[in-house]
Amino acid sequence: MGYSIKTIAQKSGLSQYTLRYYEREGVLPVVARDVNGNRCFDDEDLELISLICCLKDTGMAIADIKQFIALSKEGVSALPDQRRLLQEHKVHIDEKIKFFQSFAQKVDHKIAYFASLENEAKAARP
Amino acid sequence: MGYSIKTIAQKSGLSQYTLRYYEREGVLPVVARDVNGNRCFDDEDLELISLICCLKDTGMAIADIKQFIALSKEGVSALPDQRRLLQEHKVHIDEKIKFFQSFAQKVDHKIAYFASLENEAKAARP
DNA sequence: TTAGACCTTAGAGTTAGGTGTAAGTCAATA
DNA sequence: TATTGACTTACACCTAACTCTAAGGTCTAA
């Protein structure tokens, strides 16, 4: 019988507001409703939401995620396009990983530099 | 005689608007002026801007960067606090690197999956 | 000596990505 | 049967981080 929006909010870590907002915006495909008109998510939705979160958390804009999801609705013929979008995004992620690693180093140097300044200061007034 | 805001914008990749905004907000310490009241950046400013960009691009909020910069003005006594802030941020960066790496894998699997679906589709209509 | 390029400030406007509110429906329960 | 709680929609509001505009000052080259 599917999951309520509350359950999905808990499972996904997104707020109910955000889930509704994503559906409105086409970031999520339109979710099935039960007899009362309440949203009724299934496991496929949950999986899609998990992918959407990953895309978002790795810096893909909502508008681009929307485009990706729109392709899902087109079936097999859109697979190459979907794959291309993911590959492009993968390039961004790899670049970000490199940038983050280089910056992690830079921060480490800065931390060491601060520590050495602190020691100098300590040595100056023993 | 220092660098103009235009030069710094070019060197840093930030817009002139953003540089003025950062100064207004206290993200940048107040920049020296020449006789005409025009901003006059030096190499130290440039270095600080580069650090600010790195902090920002690795996800530190403007408000937190501001706090970090405010400590710079307090001199030696604030060094341990500055170091602590950087160390905390470093933890975030390391977490992000791990998350990005795991997601890079997930995307790779997805790409492979899409490729296999494409091949199935091809096989079905030869 | 005026046109153009550069700068200044104060303050308004924009965008992305949510968040919150109001008014109403429905189903289970005291 | 009245209330409680979860849901619905439509729409208004919010925040962060810019981005732009207006009105004006200063310098330089033709």
Image (cartoon, coloured by chain):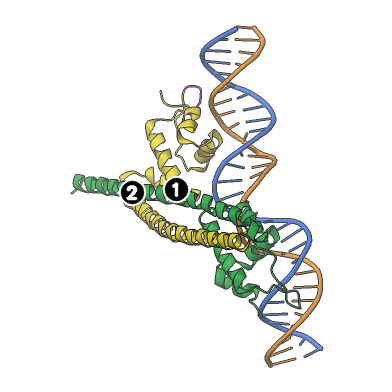
Chain colours: A yellow, B green, C blue, D orange
Judged from the image, the secondary structure of the residue bearing numbered disc 1 is: helix
Q: Quadrant of residue A91?
A: bottom left
For mark 2, does the 10 Å Cα neighbourhood hold few (<14), some (14 to 19), or many (20 or more) residues?
few
Q: Are marks 2 and 1 on the same chain?
A: yes
Main SS, magenta residues: loop
Q: Is residue A91 visible?
A: yes
Q: Residue at x 44, y 51 (%)?
A: B94
Instruction: Identify which amino acid the numbered label 2 is placed on.
Output: Gln
Q: Earlier in the sequence, mark 2 or mark 1?
A: 1
Q: Which mark lies nearer to you, 2 or 1?
A: 1
Q: CA distance from mark 2 to mark 1?
A: 16 Å
Residue C7 x/y as whole percent: 70, 73
Callout 2: SS: helix
Along the horizontal axis of the image, is C17 left or right of A64? right
Q: Residue at x 40, y 23 (%)?
A: A1
Residue D2 vertical placement versus A65 (above, below): above
Residue linked to disc 2: B105
Residue occupying the point 69% across, 68% down:
B31
Residue B54 in sight here: no
Quarter of the image where the N terminus of chain B is located: bottom right
Segment colored magenta: A35-39
What residue is drawn where x is 48% and y is 31%? Answer: A10
Where residue B56 sits in the image (x, y, percent)?
55, 57
Q: Residue furthest front?
A: A126
In magenta stretch: residue A80: no
Q: Nearer the viewer, residue B45 or D25?
A: B45
Q: Which residue position is annotated with label 1?
A: B95
Q: Chain of mark 2?
A: B
Where in the figure is residue B60, as x and y percent of width and height?
Answer: 55, 53
